[in-house]
Amino acid sequence: MYTYIIMVRKDFLSLLRETSEIDRHSRYSEIKKKIDSDPRYKAVDSGSLREDIFRDYIHELKEERRRQKDKDRESRRGERKEKEKDDTGARSGEEEGDGDTLMNETDKDADKKARQEASLREREKEVQRTLAVHLRDRDNEREQHKRDESIACFNALLADLVRNSELTWREAKRQLRKDHRWDSADLLDRDEKEKLFNEHIEELTKKKREKFRELLNETSEVTLSSSWKDIRKLIKEDPRYTKFSSSDRRCEREFKDYLKDKTSTAKAEFRELLQETKLISHKSLGLLHENENYLSEIEEILRNDKRFLSLEHIPEERTQIILTYLDELEKRGPPPPPTASEPNRRLGNNYVNTFGAYPKPGIGGSGDMFEDN
């Protein structure tokens, strides 16, 4: 932050030096009209700080003028001295030595005083710069605190008055303006208020959707093949249905999305079942080509698992998942050596943990469904 202030101050001083209308008698109120469109002017975000820098620059001009006068005075004094030499002749070596000593002491005193004054001015400038940074940070913190309060106040207003997730911003504004808290959020512009409103509506919709899906999960009659017409009769009196939406079409659309998500999950679980089944291997596709009943045998074995039965309403898609998996296995080739097959052994253990034991002999042809590599 301090480095930034120094850079901004340096740029502003460059702007002042480039402005030919400025001299040591200039006034800030007159000059700022000539430079306020320059980016270097706008970069200094404090009017008092700009004026302080301007005063420092004017002081610098005056100091330069004073030094020039001193230089001219010394030059005239030297010329006068030379003239006196020509008029009066050469002075004695002792008199000249005394004069030089006196001049040197005077110069030393003047230089010492100038250095002290310059050091004092620099310390004053440093204090001003530090104070300017502190004041600006404090102002920024105060403004941010006010904005945070406005946001909290407006969110509280939304929570109290906007509970219908289907309300539009235009409709909501008419209702919100009647509350005194609307004016308490005057630091927020129109777009910011609308953004907070939209976020509030999204949160309302999310919560109501979660409650609606919770209702569908609790309704045992809901299956992946259920129709909205049948399910609606069962849930229409539940508050989680009535609060979700006043539009039956929207409720139906959410119900269909729910079934679509459930179907995707069921398909993923069915693929896991295929991976767990020992009967299916990289040779299965070839066996299917040799024996057209082989697929029926696989499906008959899988029928003992609820993950197979969950897709009973879409048998063609279920069969296609099996065929796709057989094709993947054939392309993948034989399984890795036993030392690299520990994950498959864990799949068998997972089956035992879930169902209590391996399948009884006769299922899958060889007595168990899982590889024990």
Image: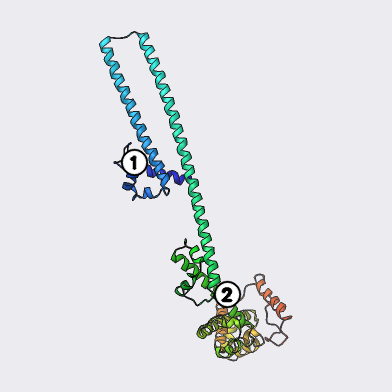
Q: Tell me: residue 32, above or below residue 321.
A: above
What residue is drawn where x is 35% and y is 33%? 62
Q: Is residue 299 visible?
A: yes
Q: From the top left corner, tell me how far across and down residue 138 is, in percent.
A: 51, 50
> Left or right of 53: which side holds 135?
right
In what quadrant of the picture does the C terminus appear? bottom right
> Left or right of 358: which side holds 149?
left
**Residue at disc 2, secondary structure:** helix
Q: Which residue is mark 2?
A: 207
Disc 2 residue type?
Lys
Q: From the top left corner, tell me how far across and down residue 228 is, in percent.
A: 55, 88
**Residue at disc 1, secondary structure:** loop
> Left or right of 123: which side holds 216?
right
Quadrant housing residue 318: bottom right
Q: From the top left corner, tell me how far across and down residue 345 is, in percent.
A: 68, 74
> Left or right of 366: which side holds 231?
left
Q: Is residue 268 visible?
A: no
In terms of sequence position, does the residue under pointer 1 or pointer 2 come before the other?
1
Q: Which residue is mark 1?
A: 27
Disc 1 residue type?
Arg
Count of numbered badges drawn on the protein: 2
What residue is drawn where x is 30% and y is 25%? 72
Q: Tell me: residue 58, above or below residue 157.
A: above
* Label 1 CA crowd tier, 10 Å (few <14, some 14–19, many 20+): some
What residue is drawn where x is 62% and y is 75%? 335
* Label 2 CA crowd tier, 10 Å (few <14, some 14–19, many 20+): few
The CA distance from mark 1 to mark 2 is 63 Å
